[in-house]
Image (spheres, helix red, strand yellow):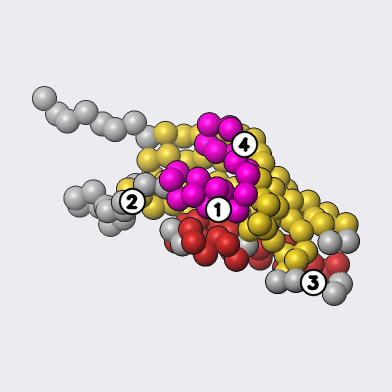
Amino acid sequence: MSLTDDRVELTQLIYRFCALMDDGRFADLRSVLAEGVTAKDPGGAPVAGRDAVIANAAAAHSPGERSQHLVHSVLIDVDGDRAGIRANVVVILSDDAAPEGAIAPEPKLTISSCLRYEAVRSPEGWRVSSIDGDLVWASHKQPQAAPA
């Protein structure tokens, strides 16, 4: 496999990870995460192991909430069967239903992060083995008070 093929597969791995999160298909995250994956919960505490990371991701998403991950500026360094991936990810959260009179839900929280992933090549293909990152900015839409 060429370095270009690896980079394409690794970019698709990150896109697939984010798409599964957006679709709420948390059980399917097993197809992109390594068994010993490590990450952090929303409060910054370490989470270790595929099942724990999946449970944490599911718990961080509320029913009745939509998310959209916009992934850009993906940079990949491949070293044999290991890779480092840096990506900027903007996550937009909204309620599932549009407010009365609106054509679609409005964003209630937008978060931009610089994420660093590590990946390992397994017999099944590339898998994410570590997720870390830094919050760059956030925008929170404050609920408006009802008119008096």
Task: Between residue 15 and residue 100, name the one nearer to us.
Answer: 15
Label 1 CA crowd tier, 10 Å (few <14, some 14–19, many 20+): some
Identify the element where label 4 is drawn.
strand
Report, in whole angstroms, how far the alpha carbon at label 1 lies from the one at label 2.
Answer: 20 Å
The residue that disc 1 covers is 51
Q: Is residue 63 above or below residue 27?
A: above
Q: Which numbered disc, 2 or 4, marks the residue closer to the eye?
A: 4
The residue that disc 3 covers is 5
Identify the element where label 3 is drawn.
helix
Tell me which numbered mark, 1 or 4, is placed earlier along the sequence.
4
Task: Between residue 66 and residue 123, name the one nearer to us.
Answer: 123
Label pair 1/4, CB-CB below 8 angstroms: no
Q: Specify start and end residues of the magenta stretch as a single range.
A: 39-60
Residue 37 colored in magenta in the image: no
The residue positioned 60% from the left and 53% from the top of the image is 50
Type of amino acid at the residue the image marks with label 1: Asp
Q: Is residue 67 left or right of residue 32?
A: left
Report, in whole angstroms, how far the alpha carbon at label 2 lies from the one at label 3.
Answer: 37 Å
Label pair 3/1, CB-CB below 8 angstroms: no
Report, in whole angstroms, how far the alpha carbon at label 2 lies from the one at label 4.
Answer: 24 Å
The residue that disc 4 covers is 46
Q: Is residue 18 left or right of residue 22?
A: right
**Furthest residue to the bottom?**
1
